[in-house]
Amino acid sequence: MKTFHWRFSVLAALLFALAGPPAAASAKEPAAARPADAKDLRFTLRYRKETTSGSGMHHALTRTEFWKPAQTAIIVCDMWDLHHCKNATLRGAELAPRMNKVLQEARQRGVTIIHAPSSCMAAYKDHPARKRALSTPKATNLPKDISSWCYKIPAEEKGTYPIDQTDGGEDDDPAEHKAWAAKLKAMGRNPRAPWKTQTALLEIADRDYITDNGVTNWSILEARGIKNVVLLGVHTNMCVLGRPFGLRQMAKNGKNVVLMRDMTDTMYNPLRKPFVSHFTGTDLIVEHIEKYVCPTVTSDQLLGGKPFRFKNDKRPRLAIVMSEKEYRTNKTLPKFAIAQLGKHFSIELVHGNLKNHTLPGVIEALKDADVLFLSVRRQTPKRVELAAIRKFIASGKPVLGIRTSSHAFCLKNGSSKPFAEGHAAWPELDAEVWGGHYTGHHGNQYKPAIRVADGAEKHQILSGVKFNGYRSGGSLYQTRPLAKTTKAVLLGQIEGHPAEPVAWTNTPKTGNRTFYTSLGHVDDFKSPAFNRFLRNAVYWAAGAKVSDRVPPGF
């Protein structure tokens, strides 16, 4: 079969799709295929584990596995030539060139490649890869319902599905979508289901397989002794999860299955709950998969370099580390993050284990983070965990702290003694990073009045915020005197006592853009003013312009 080599831009790929590709694009065998006994594939699997049993809080961890190429398959799910959603078509065309490189490398190393463009089998009736699939003997151990969609597995009953996709996930502008549907119709395509082939940006070798059938797919895996399966393609929250050859069926029937999380996309409309960006919607689905279905990997583990990222995904990566129970920020901060930051930030949550003073997942979370947000109280983590935090801060990246983070990494009285062997303290955090001087707090019965500090009225953190007559729900921390490198933003005062700084910025020796506030009582999060203020602080720390209309990319 003739080989098609496509190296188009996204726009060129779309134009090609509109013209209609040949039905049976095929690729020749790699000229320099590696021997059958090639080295094992090395994958770093990311998964999520409950921090403490029954808490509902999870953290990300990784483990390394080595897979035999001959026992491994990649299933390409529904990478169609056209889609009823124009944005989905564009994203698919952007994704495909990198995906094709993944398939080329995996094929060269002896991995089985299965192309599964659902409802497009007629286009491939004469393709050798299709004939190979159809000639595969039916497996004798077919799982129950392997020919059916799977909409949920028992493990998912423990969680809540994170996005509303009941509208089908269209994220096109209505006017553009209407024009797109008209264009599809003029091409003779069904605007609701315009796909006819897999995108020609993905090469299909004669030695590959083509099938969209759960029974045939399973039979191929069994005939070839496949134990490990990588799913990639679209759309994660629908076809990749639910198809008869999808993640749920593979997981529940005993395959060692993973999602290649940077080689996928979702059908999610940001106008639906939880009202986050399209890319954050994908992140939420990936987290759900890692918690309840299977681990994930990334394409760079085969190709090197960095994981793929869509060109319009410019979100800073924010790591929020929570390990305190006094003010329940393990509840308030995740809700705040989704509601206030989910449109413009990629968010990774780390929940500490208070009983054993550990921050599971913090090392992994900080590897790619751009901004760190701390809400920790009197914890002395493992030495390697605290070292990761100190390294992040020493790098000069932005860091924020809330409430008890003035005394985050030390036991009472500023002790440098850690919780246990192998753990570490950092009592100097308050002075060295925040520029504060926490010595205690006034009685809980006093609710401090909050006002803007002199000279801070035009600070961008206060953009759109009115604290007139506001009283915090929590006690007033004693934080004076601040370091000379700080700039007070808010003051708090109770009757008969001097005012105390309750929010300020700092420029420590490491040069970080640093923000700290002693506010953060659970009642503070009920205030629109406080939520807006804290949101502004995160944008400010990340270097984003704070305004009523946050600019694209943040």
Image (cartoon, grey):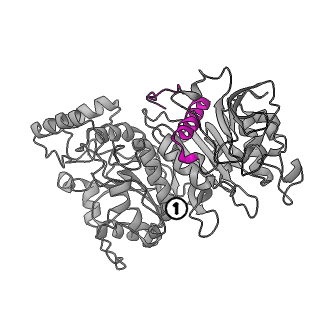
Answer yes or no: is residue 31 visible: no
Residue 269 quadrant: top left
Q: Is residue 532 magenta?
A: yes
At label 1, the amino acid type is Lys
Q: Residues within 10 Å of mark 1 (few under 14, many from 20)?
A: many
The x and y percentages for residue 539 are 56, 32
Residue 219 quadrant: bottom left
| Range drawn in magenta | 525-554
Q: Residue at x 76, y 63 (%)?
A: 356
The x and y percentages for residue 545 are 53, 25
363 vs 244, left or right, is right
The x and y percentages for residue 174 are 23, 37
Answer yes or no: is residue 384 visible: yes
Q: Residue at x 57, y 39 (%)?
A: 530
Of 180 and 432, nearer the camera is: 432
Q: Residue at x 66, y 54 (%)?
A: 327
What residue is pinned by disc 1? Answer: 291
